[in-house]
């Protein structure tokens, strides 16, 4: 088996294991995180209707101008604050955190901590 395919299969298993336990509703949407090497993206998703309620990423114009590099913990903190502000704007105070297939450390943890500091409840 190709090593790259094996790595992808393991990642898919981890992702499905997390998604089996996490489901977002309109009152308590899912805060989904995706991280690439250069950027970080997050969304508030209502799984019952299949709609994205709010997004934030290091590629957003207002965040991008504050950063020199989008793939570090400082960028994750800014994205976490931005998604918490977007959630407040649409009247959401509680979310379910979906870390996808990533371990809860580094950029993912920084994003979650920044969102919590901005009064978003997990």
Image: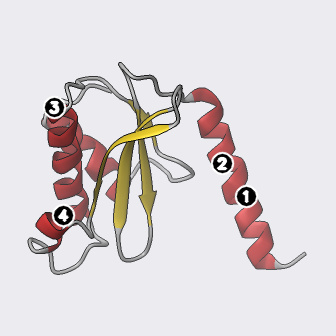
Quarter of the figure that contains the C terminus: top left
Q: CA distance from mark 2 to mark 4?
A: 26 Å
Q: Which residue is mark 1?
A: 10
Q: Which residue is mark 3?
A: 88
Is the residue 81 above or below the residue 107 in the image?
above
Q: Which mark sits nearer the N-terminus, 2 or 4?
A: 2
Q: Which residue is mark 4?
A: 74
Q: Point out residue 110 in the picture as x, y percentages from the top left corner.
A: 27, 51
State yes or no: discs 1 and 2 in contact (Cβ < 8 Å): yes
Residue drawn at x 19%, y 45% as measured from the top left: 114
Q: Which residue is mark 2?
A: 14
Kind of element beneath mark 2: helix
Q: Which mark sits nearer the N-terminus, 2 or 3?
A: 2
Q: CA distance from mark 3 to mark 4?
A: 22 Å
Kind of element beneath mark 4: helix
Q: Point out residue 9 in the picture as x, y percentages from the top left corner.
A: 76, 60
């Amino acid at each position: 088996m190709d090593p790259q395919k094996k790595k992808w299969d393991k990642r898919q298993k981890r992702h499905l294991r997390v998604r089996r336990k996490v489901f977002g509703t309109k009152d308590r949407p899912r805060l989904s995180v995706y991280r690439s090497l250069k950027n970080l993206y997050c969304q508030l998703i209502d799984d019952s209707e299949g709609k994205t309620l709010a997004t934030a990423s290091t590629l957003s114009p207002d965040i991008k101008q504050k950063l020199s590099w989008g793939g570090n913990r400082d960028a994750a903190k800014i994205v976490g604050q931005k998604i918490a502000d977007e959630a407040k704007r649409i009247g959401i105070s509680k979310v379910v955190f979906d870390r996808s297939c990533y371990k809860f450390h580094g950029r993912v943890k920084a994003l979650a901590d920044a969102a919590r500091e901005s009064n978003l409840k997990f």
